[in-house]
Image (tube, grey):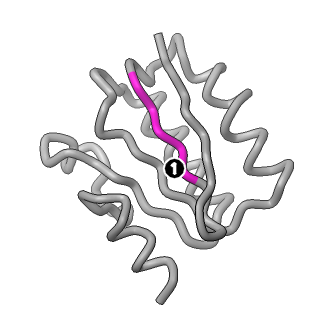
Amino acid sequence: MLEINIGSKKGILFVRLYGCLNKETTKAFDKKVVELLYKIGVNNMVLNIKNLKQIDNYGIEKIKKCYEICDKSYICINLKQINLIKKLKWVIKEEDAINLINT
């Protein structure tokens, strides 16, 4: 199961994920997140995956897709997830992402 919480603050879209982002849940992610990014033309996004219990290669590909769509995007992670997102911009706290986007 995947729960998606979406909000915005200071011109930045925040997407918070809970549960699992895997082969079974990527369609829900596409429908709710990726389609929204295309529809409203988001430039700045913070994707918070700290509360994901499980993520597989399908989920990682969806995260990379978000990077392709947005000009400035950061992933908010817990330290156990660092190996999953090599080469992508990441932060520990959402506030750090806000500061980086606004610089």
Residue at x-position 56% and y-position 71%: 72
In magenta, the rendered stretch is 14-18
| Residue 28 against residue 95 in the figure, above or below | above
Residue drawn at (73%, 27%) of the image: 31
Q: Quadrant of residue 10?
A: bottom right
Q: Could you tell me the amino acid type at mark 1? A: Lys
Between 30 and 57, the one nearer to me in the picture: 30
Q: Is residue 1 left or right of residue 39?
A: left
Residue sitting farthest toward the left: 80
- Which quarter of the figure has residue 71? bottom right
Our reading of the magenta stretch's main secondary structure is strand
The reply, left or right, for residue 27 in relation to residue 97 is right
Residue with the mark numbered 1: 64
> 10 Å neighbourhood of mark 1: few (<14), some, or many (≥20)?
few
Residue 78 versus residue 32 in the image, above or below = below
The structure residue drawn at horizontal position 46% and vertical position 10%, both measured from the top left corner, is 1
8 or 90: nearer the viewer: 8
**Can you give x and y, in whole percent of width and height, for residue 73 in the image?**
52, 64
Where disc 1 sits, the SS reads helix
Residue 57 position, x and y percent, is 40, 30
Is 1 included in the stretch rendered in magenta? no
- Residue 15 magenta: yes
Residue at 39% across, 54% down: 75
Vertical side of 6 occupied by 92: above or below: below
Which residue sits furthest front?
9
| Position of residue 67 in the picture relative to residue 96 (left or right) | right
Residue that protrudes farthest toward the right in the picture: 39
The image position of residue 93, as x and y in percent, is: 28, 59
